[in-house]
Image (cartoon, rainbow, N blue to C red):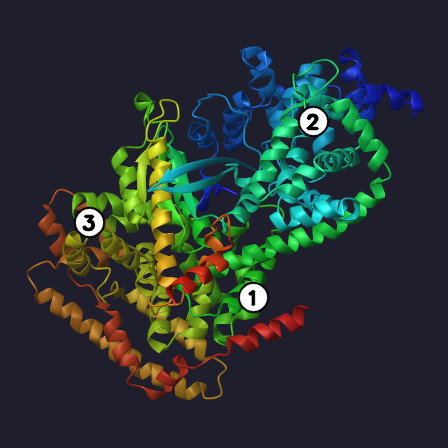
Amino acid sequence: GISMYRTTEIYELILEGLPDKLRCELWLIFSGAIHQKNTNPFVYKNLVNQPADEFEVTMDEIERDLHRSLPEHVAFQSEIGINALRRVLKSYAVRNPKIGYCQAMNIITSVLLLYCGEEDTFWLLTSICERLLPDYYNTKVVGAQIDAGVFEDLCENYLKDIYVKLKELSVISYVSLAWFLTLFISSMPFDSAVYLIDCFFYDGAKVMFQLALTILQENKEALLKCNDEGDSIALLAKYLEGIDNPDRKIPNASANIKDLIRNSYINFGTITDEDINRLRLKHRLRVVQNMEETLLNSIAKNVSKQCSFSDDQIKDFFYIFKQVSKIGIIDGDNRNLTINKEQFLKLNKNLCDWEALCDDEIAGRIFDFLKCCPSERTNETKISKLIMTSIANGVPDSNEAYKSEKSDKSDNIDFLHFIRYMNIIYKSDANIRLKFLYGVSMNDCEKKVQIYNGIFWVLANKIEVLGVKYNDKNKSSLVDSIESSNINKSSLPIMNQDEFIGFWEIVYNLFTGMENEGEMYHASATVSTLLLRLGEVSRKYQESESQPRSESKTNVDQEKEIENVQIESSTSLDETSKTNEKIWSITFEQLIASLLTDNLLVNYFDAKFDVEKKLTDYKSQHA
Amino acid sequence: MAKAYDYLFKLLLIGDSGVGKTCVLFRFAEDQYNATFISTIGIDFKIRTIELDGKKIKLQIWDTAGQERFRTITTAYYRGAMGILLVYDITSEKSFDSIRNWIRNIEEHASADVERMLIGNKCDMNDRRQVSKERGEKLAIEYGMKCMETSAKLNENIENAFFTLARDIKAKTEKRLNQNRPGSNSQNGTGSNTKLKPKDNGGSKSSFFKMCTIL
């Protein structure tokens, strides 16, 4: 491969600034990018031609920034430069989807393109993103946050008085972010920053720290006089804008980049890569912990209204949930974590104290129930939009909202689903728990969603809050219409015979293995027989009714639906009355009333479980 | 020493990448328009001092990067903000849809009594409009905030937006200041001293001073 001796002559050359013509060649050698380029001859060409359909969001982000990269330079005021920039950024995003595209990469790339061809630029960018500035541009910009911390430590070591002052104004980490992320290009004239880039490719990240320290040192007097952080930031911004270079003098320049770099080597050249790596390790831990803490706090704040757990309990639950979902804090969207069925079963076994519900068969049905009901959070926008249009039309049409909610199902559940389920286990009484099992037994997804919403008042709450905020005058009519619509009424969808049998299957399973198994079976047999008769009565009652009832739509079971299709020709009135015939059904009210007559059953479903103990046990087992 | 300002208000601009936050700020702070700014990296800021009812108010306005991955960094600046402008682009449905996420960020990271305002920018591009004015207004009502459509390019409503927000913050601050005075029994100004920074004497000192004159 190609290599080069590190000699004092080369240092002198770098400190003078590389000649424009040699920049590209030397950057490639200094950074080692030349090796990657030579060993991967067709990679760039292939990447350019590769379709990027799956990266639509990333491509949009790139597109938006093309004209905001180096707008003052004539090269990026025409399509030629813009297209080259687009190709390089797109190729990199396709090459490394884990980084994709991060703002700041556009700025660096545009300057590289002024001195290098596209392919060379691509490989230089790769070496910056993947080796020279590790983790800088990933989805949480962790590397840059770490280096901001490293810079603070260096300030404390080398520039104590400025550190004390700027710490008080909390400025240090703020200024260093943009400096480091763009190699100073976004803060000083690019033709000055390019002198730093010469050194950067040769000596690595340490030169950024050297220069940053030098800039603070040069402004020491003025910085110490600043009253607030705004003043000190403005002062530094003005200073950096005024840094010129040997090729282009600025009138009233604040400094010359060549002198600054020379001073930076003289005053801070003793800082080694080892020093920096040691500090990075220390700050990585801090940054990751901070991120985790922030995440936990915001989750707790978000979810606390949706359940009766304490903030600490929510955090524990989330922490465990996150572990199971196997998504690290650094990568991925931590706020919209989801888990699949397998993960849920595992989590449920560990965290559910109601032992009978840990059975895979029942837990699987619970998962299917939760999965069927999109969480409020993911659908917030859509529901609110629907509500807004409904308000505009006068009446909130809750059925519309249900339907659209149903439409985008996923195979996972999110944390809100999970914590609500845990709330059923640990913080609910027999009534709510039975309502939950009633929902789990339903076959029809629409019914599940209605029951889920009935338990958690997802929509009702939303509309109520809206109604109050919207307009006092409109409020009364809005509340009226909510009351007349079926969501706020206690009535849940009616259960058909199949679902009824499913419900009792679950209940029997719950009792299996209990000490008083026999007694429990007996009690539930009595209740279920009673309910079976009630359902029969309701069928006979419906038969004798000549008028179709308005809620008939909800108790159409699958068979009848097929029948419906077959008699398309008949009028709608005929259809409804026909579907009403011979339907065995019971309501939730009937179910709960019958169940609560038996003390054994009441006690069973009212049993209390200790969440604190369960969480403590889990933590001690998994510590 | 002459008093440079009576109040210092910290404002924050948030919203999706490319909606024109930097242009709005540049128009307000420098009264200039530039169609092509370099994309904001991390966080940036500008200062302008305005006068309201005879009071000099120094506005320190923080501009943030819109890209999602900078969120962990930018949310660190929410806490100190007394007013937040939520900016969307009227020619971009997506940027409008994101407003709810930005509000969620505010709820999670900003202080509870922060003043908020919804800004629909680029209203000069009516021919490419995707978000009607009514929808903006409805969203603003839903969250109990004011809203305005602006154009940084044509300098429409920019002054108005910042002045309105500053006026609301000032009213709130002065109300709290009055409550904190002895005489009115409510001494429960939670953390209000940190919000008010008269130049010559620190917040706590000034209220002590006022207390003395009344007694």
- Looking at the rendered structure, the secondary structure element under dot 3 is helix
The residue carrying pointer 3 sits among few (fewer than 14), some (14 to 19) or many (20 or more) residues within 10 Å by Cα, namely some
Marks 3/1: CA–CA distance: 50 Å
Q: Which residue is label 2 attached to?
A: A125
Residue toward you, B116 or A167 = A167
Q: Chain of mark 1?
A: A
User: Which numbered disc, 3 or 1, marks the residue that appears first in the sequence?
Assistant: 1
Q: Which residue is label 1 attached to?
A: A316
Q: Which x, y percent locates residue A245? A: 72, 18
Q: Which residue is label 3 attached to?
A: A564
- Looking at the rendered structure, the secondary structure element under dot 2 is helix
Q: Is residue B105 left or right of residue A260?
A: left
Give the label, 3 or 1, closer to the camera.
1
| 2 and 1 marks in contact (CB < 8 Å) | no
Marks 3/2: CA–CA distance: 64 Å
| 3 and 2 marks in contact (CB < 8 Å) | no
On-image quarter of the N terminus of chain A: top right
Residue type at tag 2: Leu
Residue toward you, A621 or B46 = B46
Marks 2/1: CA–CA distance: 41 Å
Q: Is residue A515 left or right of residue A430?
A: right
